[in-house]
Image (cartoon, rainbow, N blue to C red):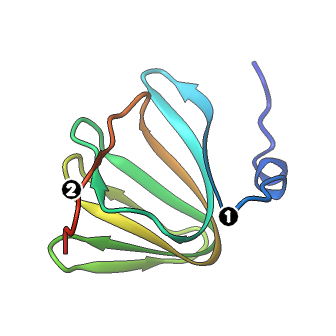
């Protein structure tokens, strides 16, 4: 058993994008995502994805035109197969949960 200091992990990130697995739990994983800017349109065909914002503001756009904005300590589950992209407003720190090794399929011009 190892204690993971999430605050220290995110404070150590100096690049504009990092998405790393912190721990595996059963057949799922918990990731730390620290980034600025926009991530590409994509979906995960075999896994739901839970986003929990720890710091900053995260916009999540869906291919159907819907958009949501999450602040610190807000969360949402994006169902498997849902085409989406994320955009950080400034530096954003998120914890995400998904199946370990979940496939990511990138989509061009989803909107």
Q: Is residue 11 left or right of residue 46?
A: right
From the viewer's perspective, tell me whether residue 86 is left or right of residue 106: right
75 vs 13, nearest the viewer? 13
Please state, as top left, top right, bottom left or bottom right, where the C terminus lies in the image.
Answer: bottom left
What's the CA distance linking mark 2 and mark 1?
25 Å
Residue that numbered label 2 is attached to: 82
In front here: 33 or 48? 33
Q: For the N terminus, which image quadrant?
A: top right
Whichever of callouts 2 and 1 sits on the residue coming sooner in the sequence is 1
- The residue at the far left in this view is 64
Helix, strand or loop for disc 2: loop
Q: Is residue 85 above or below residue 90?
A: above
Q: Whole-percent x and y of residue 104?
A: 33, 42
Quick one: 108 or 49, which is closer to the camera? 108
The residue at 44%/28% (across/down) is 100
Give the number of the mark in front: 2 or 1.
1
The residue under the point 51% across, 69% down is: 74
| Numbered label attached to residue 70 | none
Q: Is residue 89 above or below residue 93?
A: below
Q: Is residue 5 above or below residue 92?
A: above
Q: Residues within 10 Å of mark 2 (few under 14, many from 20)?
A: some
Left or right of residue 93, residue 103 in this image: left
Residue that badge 1 annotates? 16
Instruction: From the top left corner, tell me how far across and down residue 16 is, in percent.
Output: 67, 64
């Amino acid at each position: 058993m190892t204690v993971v200091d999430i605050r220290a992990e995110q404070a150590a990130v100096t690049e504009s994008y990092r998405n790393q697995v912190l721990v595996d739990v059963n057949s799922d994983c918990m990731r730390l995502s620290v980034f600025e800017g926009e991530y590409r349109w994509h979906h995960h065909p075999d896994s739901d994805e839970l986003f929990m914002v720890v710091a900053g503001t995260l916009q999540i756009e869906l291919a159907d035109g819907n958009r949501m904005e999450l602040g610190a300590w807000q969360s949402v589950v994006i169902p498997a197969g849902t085409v989406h992209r994320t955009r950080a407003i400034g530096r954003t720190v998120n914890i995400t949960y998904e199946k370990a090794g979940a496939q990511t399929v990138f989509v061009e011009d989803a909107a």
